[in-house]
Image (cartoon, rainbow, N blue to C red):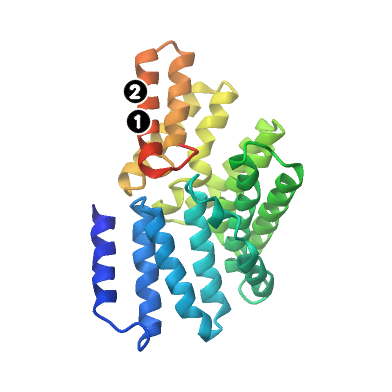
Amino acid sequence: AAWSEAARCYEAALDAMDEAAEPVPAIALHRQAAVCHRYDLELGQAIRHFERAIELCAPFGDMAAEAELYLWRMRCGIASQHLLDVVVDRTPLERLVGQLEATHPALAAEGLVELSQSFWLEGQMQSQWVEGQVARAEEAARHAMAIADRVGHHAAFARATMSLCVPQWARYDLLGSLATLEAGVARARKAKARSELAGGPLFRLPLVLTWLGRFDEAQERALECCAVADEIHYPLEEGLPLAALAQLAVARGDFDAAERHAHQALLIQRLSGYHWA
């Protein structure tokens, strides 16, 4: 409710202004409204605001501002199986990331994370792992990690590990993905913002621990994930730790708990369209 109310306030401000006469504040308001809609799982509305902000931003030639809007737009697309057209629209962000790496390395790292996810997600959403796309996804993720490590951007490093673990899963490298995700969680904690723990490597770690048979650790991490999601009102990726809890319950023979966790995860999926839930 808080995210929705904030979005309405930003939209009311936009309704009261002449965007053509005041493009700079309009860009900021569209961006803020978009971010609120994203966290409220209203991804289509978020994308419309980001696209309007991009349109208003274009005449200024501010590549950094434009890249930041494009990466957020793609971040919204990645969150839903119904927005593949946004996910595969990589050309503008690829161009901007290439131009900004020298001058805005942290932003370039963020952009590479979204591009990495775009590469592997396109193939996964088409029900096939395409070797070339998986390789490009891994390359972009490792590039992002290298840049983020060099400039001390802990949040970007953490998100890059989240993207890197998927190609590792595709080749059944569970121990490698565990090390990758643990490094990502450590960096997310260094970012000193609880919001950086939402989603990302922390929410994927319980699944890997479950697959490796480390049930107690998996449950402890999964419960932490659910607490973080509740604390910052971010249910989008909560289906991931809930899936781990469902698997753990099945392994332990507690089928009532398994059904409860699975039902909650599927409810999140229906509300958000987030296919990983």
In depth, the one of 214 and 50 nearer the eye is 50
Quarter of the image with the C terminus in it? top left
Which corner quadrant of the image does residue 178 belong to? top right
Q: Which residue is mark 1?
A: 264
Residue 185 lies left or right of residue 48; in this view the side is right
Relative to 151, does residue 199 appear above or below in the rendering? above
Q: Residue at x 59, y 67 (%)?
A: 106
Q: Residue at x 65, y 58 (%)?
A: 144
Q: Which residue is mark 2?
A: 260
Identify the amino acid type marked 2: Arg
In depth, the one of 59 and 66 nearer the eye is 59
Q: Are marks 2 and 1 in contact (CB under 8 Å)?
A: yes
Few, some or many residues within 10 Å of mark 2 (<14, 14–19, 20+): some
Q: Residue at x 57, y 46 (%)?
A: 162
Q: Residue at x 43, y 10 (%)?
A: 253
The numbered dot on residue 217 is none
Residue 144 lies left or right of residue 41; in this view the side is right
Identify the amino acid type marked 1: Gln
> How far across and how far down the image is residue 264, in percent?
35, 30
SS type, badge 1: helix
Relative to 99, does residue 273 appear above or below in the rendering? above
> How far across and how far down the image is residue 160, in percent?
60, 52
